[in-house]
Each structure stands twice: as structure tokens, then as C-alpha cells.
Amino acid sequence: MDSELGQPATAVDFPRAPRIITVANQKGGVGKTTTAINLGTALAAVRKDVLVIDMDPQGNATTGLGIDRGAIPYTSYELVMGEATVEQAALETQVPQLDIIGSTVDLSGAEIELVDTPRREYRLREALAGQVGGYDYVLIDCPPALGLLTLNSLVAADAVLVPLQCEYYALEGVSHLVRTIDRVKRALNPGLEIQGVVLTMFDRRNNLSSMVADDVRSHFGDKVYKTIIPRNVRVSEAPSHGKPVLLYDLTCVGSQAYMHLASEVLKREHATA
């Protein structure tokens, strides 16, 4: 099948829809938002209907998909607070078959406002229930923290995708996230699973990157995707142009890596169907 972006790709038929995948890591600067928007773009390129939900008050996924944060009528804040529906908040992007529910700094107030709210951990899950049937995949981009916004994202999800930067303290940081996922699974969302761990910002010129990759694979085994996202200047440049890297430069190694990652995600989804 030819993709919308002109890149030959093989789509895997997958009967269940939608699947909700939260992209999470409490550490910042690991390629979390970059992974969310480019994985979403790659899935859309193989004819999947995708919704990205920006649950980070910084709103980088929103601007990274070319949306003006100052012109959004309804955001993920209104969604979580019960003031807007998915249909009202979802905006079309420049990527065919990819919508986004954007975020602004207002979302940071939700952390405080939800503290005394009944079923505070379930607000996003309840907002999405029965409202996302038009999508094959919902990708939730979390803030770099393990607060109520991330907790809501984990409770709403079927699976978690963990971007992990190839640096010295990578495993130490992600172990805390894994413990949190386990607690959420036991207490709030029994169906939650780790879809996979993706190694990001890999520099083949740096021996440390290879050492970290080996350590992560020995720790997580086959949960680690075969695809590795390399350090790539085109990936870094794309957000400043309000585009996913697949639109900014389809032929660069970063774009090709995200296409391969999407293929792996689909195959894993198909295997668990």
C-alpha cells in the first residue's frame, strides 16, 4: 500500500479499534513528544485514523503538528474537566487522517483542580469512553512528570510506549516509571500493559549509546523495539517549522526510523489481537 506521504508501507489489518497508547517517561528531553507526533503521522500514512491528545501543558505536540495554541477553542483541559467533548476538542492537522486535541498552559491548573475531585484518576478515561470510535489509534502525549495528568493518561490507556534516551542514567529513571505502571495496573487499570520501549537519540559514534542499548535490551528483553531512533538534525529542526519530521523531510534517517517503528507497533498490536 502506498502511504499518504508517498512512502511505500505495509499496513497490518487490526480488528480492534480504537487502541489507546500513552507515550510516557517522567524524564524530559527523551524524545517523548517527537515520538508521539511522528508515530502518529506514520500510522496515519498507512491509512490508520489517529488522534493525538496533548496532555502536556507545554503544548509541544500541539505546535509540533502546526496548531496555533492561541486559536484553540477547546483543549485537553476542557476535555478532562468535562467542559468539552472529544468531537468539540479534536482539530484536523495538516496530516491526513491525523487529528489532535491540543493543549495550553491552562492544563497545568488541572493538576490542582483535580486533587479534590471524585474519581480524579478516571477523568480522561471517562471523557474518552464511547467518544473515540472513529479512530484506530489514540496516542496520549504525557508531561515529563508522574502527576495527575500522567496518571489520568495511564488509567485511560490500553498500553504504554516508553521512549528511552541512550544515556547513562536511562535505566535508573525508567525503573520508577515501570513501578508506577505496575501500581496503576494493580489498583486502577488491570488491562494496562507496556507496548514497548523505544530507544531514542542513538548516536552510533558514541560507545555509550551502544552500551546503554545493550543494557536496556538485557533488562527489558523483547519489550524493546528493534527500531532505534537516531540522533538526526532534521528531526530536531522539524518542530520549529510546525511539522512532523515525516512531512519536513521524508527521506531523512529519522523519518525512516519512525516509519519502521510504526510497522513494529502495528505488528505487536496484531499479535495481541
Image: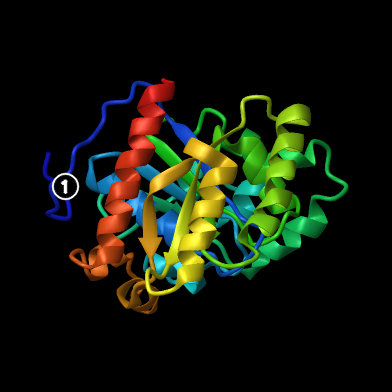
Relative to 142, 44 lies left or right = left
Total marks shown come to: 1
Which residue occupies the foreground of this view, 112 or 194? 194
Q: Residue at x 76, y 28 (%)?
A: 186
Relative image position of residue 67 (x, y in whole percent): 41, 67
Residue underneath mark 1 = 3
Q: For mark 1, give the secondary structure.
A: loop
Kindly indicate the quadrant of the structure image that contains residue 245. bottom left
Relative image position of residue 121 (x, y in whole percent): 75, 40
Relative image position of residue 240 (x, y in whole percent): 38, 79
Q: Residue at x 56, y 53 (%)?
A: 215
Relative vertical location of residue 182 with respect to residue 190 in this rendering, above or below: below
Relative vertical location of residue 36 with respect to residue 186 in this rendering, above or below: below
* Quarter that holds the C terminus: top left
Relative image position of residue 51 (x, y in whole percent): 42, 46
Q: Is residue 67 visible?
A: no
* Quarter that holds the N terminus: top left
Relative vertical location of residue 265 with respect to residue 75 in this rendering, above or below: above
Relative to 66, 10 lies left or right = left
Kindly indicate the quadrant of the structure image that contains residue 125. top right
